[in-house]
Image (cartoon, helix red, strand yellow):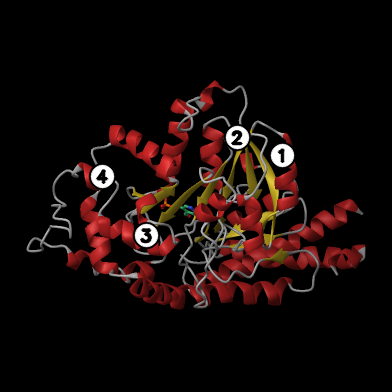
């Protein structure tokens, strides 16, 4: 509709938006929709964790390990109960699971470090020996994934993200013909930021990909495996079994995290992979640490108890954040619906909404919002190297602010989207 405005209508839109934005500026607001952080009400849900392991608690696990002491070699991969719990969460055999520390990103980084120093088990060609390594990066995607691959000097190739996962026609075409492509980043459940869930067909095609490189890996980040907003339990095919079906058992490396179940940055994480890959990872991990924090693992096991109980906790999270997602969507619909200048996702889980604004205006929208006191994730950050080719994607993180703040912030954002679109359209006329 905006595109059909004549010059006068566009000028009217610009001056009305400008006036509203000037008023917002004068309010001196400080609103933050930039990072996917749980709000304090969500964190309050898990404070009971501090009561389950106290000075008078029994510190022995079911296998007799005293969690206050260094790990016994057999339990270096994590407390048996913790591995069992993650095994249920990600539907992967317990023996293929390694329990890490408080950050799954740290495990991802460590996995790359090992690849660059030693290469894959059996091949033993350090990735640092290769002149070029490329990774497929479904985009919009998670900026911190991209920061890791960028750090290691890996060339990142953006791949279009569809509603059912990465565009597999492109992925198949690229991997079949380029030996330098050695992996892909995937967040298959409630992807960051679009919130899409990969279809079974996408997962099958990833597992059965015919790759020019024999070293192709799938980095499979299950960060939002449990994070349903509407009570659905998402069950996707287990990528390790699926890859094994096609003779590619060493292809997937799976990650999961309790960061958004209990405490962000103080949860427990895991890495899962084929027998060969996990054994090799553990060999290196033993050199880097005498063991991860078993006391925190015990706290999680005792507090969370089992998958049914975790799902109940996740429903409580959903009760807190679902109205926030709905508030954002309601304002987008009311203020931007039908204008033909913006599109957005309507996720059923995860932590984000992906907003596409009028092409070549996302940076401008970001900066107008900043001037009005609304902090958004920088435009471009959902693409490799921070370069969104159409400068149109913005990641909206509704969980942290309260509803009133969100209301304000989204109204400002929508006004900025309209202003920037009208300016762009008029300048193109
Ligand atoms: C897709 C994804 N993976 C991983 C993380 C971070 O996990 P952790 O806190 O375990 O490092 C996030 C946090 O936003 C995320 O969105």
Where 20 falls versus 71 (above or below)? below
Mark 1 Cα within 10 Å, few/some/many (few <14, many 20+)? Answer: some
Question: Could you tell me residue 17's position as x and y percent?
Answer: 73, 66
- First of labels 2, 4 by sequence position: 4
- First of labels 2, 3 by sequence position: 3
Confirm or deny contact between disc 1 and disc 4 (CB under 8 A).
no
Confirm or deny contact between disc 3 and disc 1 (CB under 8 A).
no
- First of labels 1, 4 by sequence position: 4
Real-space CA distance between mark 1 and mark 4, rounded to the nearest whole angstrom: 38 Å
Q: Residue furthest toward the left?
A: 56
Real-space CA distance between mark 2 and mark 3, rounded to the nearest whole angstrom: 29 Å
Residue corresponding to mark 3: 86
Q: Secondary structure at mark 3?
A: helix
- First of labels 4, 3 by sequence position: 4
Confirm or deny contact between disc 2 and disc 4 (CB under 8 A).
no
- First of labels 1, 2 by sequence position: 1
- What is the quadrant of the C terminus in the image? bottom right
Real-space CA distance between mark 2 and mark 4, rounded to the nearest whole angstrom: 30 Å
Q: Secondary structure at mark 1?
A: helix
Which residue is depicted at the point 29% across and 58% down?
Answer: 82
Residue corresponding to mark 4: 76
Query: Within the image, what quadrant is residue 18 found in?
Result: bottom right
The mark lying in front, picked from 3 and 1, is 1
Confirm or deny contact between disc 4 and disc 3 (CB under 8 A).
no
Q: Which mark is residue 214?
A: 2
Residue corresponding to mark 1: 176
Taking the image as shown, residue 378 lies to the left or right of residue 402, namely: right
Which residue is depicted at the point 23% across and 45% down?
Answer: 74
Q: Secondary structure at mark 2?
A: loop
Which residue is depicted at the point 52% across and 68% down?
Answer: 235
Real-space CA distance between mark 3 and mark 1, rounded to the nearest whole angstrom: 33 Å
């Amino acid at each position: 509709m905006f595109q059909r405005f004549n010059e006068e209508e566009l000028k009217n839109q610009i001056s009305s938006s400008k006036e509203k934005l000037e008023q917002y500026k004068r309010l001196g607001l400080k609103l933050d929709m930039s990072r996917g952080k749980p709000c304090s009400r969500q964190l309050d849900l898990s404070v009971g964790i501090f009561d389950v392991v106290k000075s008078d608690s029994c510190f022995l696990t079911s296998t007799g390990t005293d969690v206050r002491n260094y790990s016994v070699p057999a339990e270096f991969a994590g407390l048996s109960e913790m591995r069992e719990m993650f095994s249920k969460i990600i539907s992967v055999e317990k023996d293929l699971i390694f329990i890490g520390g408080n950050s799954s990103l740290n495990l991802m980084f460590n996995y790359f470090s090992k690849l660059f120093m030693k290469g894959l088990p059996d091949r033993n060609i350090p990735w640092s020996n290769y002149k070029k390594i490329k990774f497929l990066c479904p985009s919009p995607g998670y900026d911190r994934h991209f920061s890791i691959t960028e750090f290691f000097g890996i060339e990142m190739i953006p791949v279009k993200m569809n509603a059912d996962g990465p565009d597999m026609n492109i992925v198949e075409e690229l991997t079949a013909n380029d030996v330098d492509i050695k992996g892909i980043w995937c967040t298959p459940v409630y992807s960051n930021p679009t919130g899409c869930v990969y279809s079974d067909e996408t997962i099958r095609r990833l597992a059965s990909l015919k790759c020019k490189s024999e070293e192709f890996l799938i980095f499979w980040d299950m960060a939002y495996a449990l994070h349903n907003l509407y009570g659905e339990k998402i069950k996707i095919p287990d990528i390790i079994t699926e890859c094994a079906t096609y003779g590619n058992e060493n292809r997937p490396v799976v990650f999961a995290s309790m960061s958004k179940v209990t405490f962000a940055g103080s949860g427990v994480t895991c890495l899962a992979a084929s027998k060969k890959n996990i054994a090799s990872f553990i060999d290196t991990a033993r050199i880097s640490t005498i063991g991860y924090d078993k006391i925190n693992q015990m706290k999680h096991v005792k507090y969370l108890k089992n998958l049914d109980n975790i799902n109940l906790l996740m429903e409580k999270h959903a009760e807190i954040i679902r109205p926030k997602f709905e508030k954002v969507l309601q304002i987008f619909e009311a203020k931007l619906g039908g204008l033909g200048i913006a599109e957005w996702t309507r996720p059923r889980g995860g932590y984000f909404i992906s907003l596409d604004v009028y092409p070549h205006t996302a940076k401008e929208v970001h900066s107008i919002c900043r001037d009005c006191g609304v902090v958004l994730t920088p435009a471009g950050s959902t693409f490799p190297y921070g370069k969104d080719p159409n400068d149109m994607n913005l990641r909206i993180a509704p969980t942290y602010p309260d509803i009133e703040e969100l209301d304000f912030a989204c109204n400002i954002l929508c006004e900025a989207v309209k202003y920037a679109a009208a300016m762009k359209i008029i300048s193109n006329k």
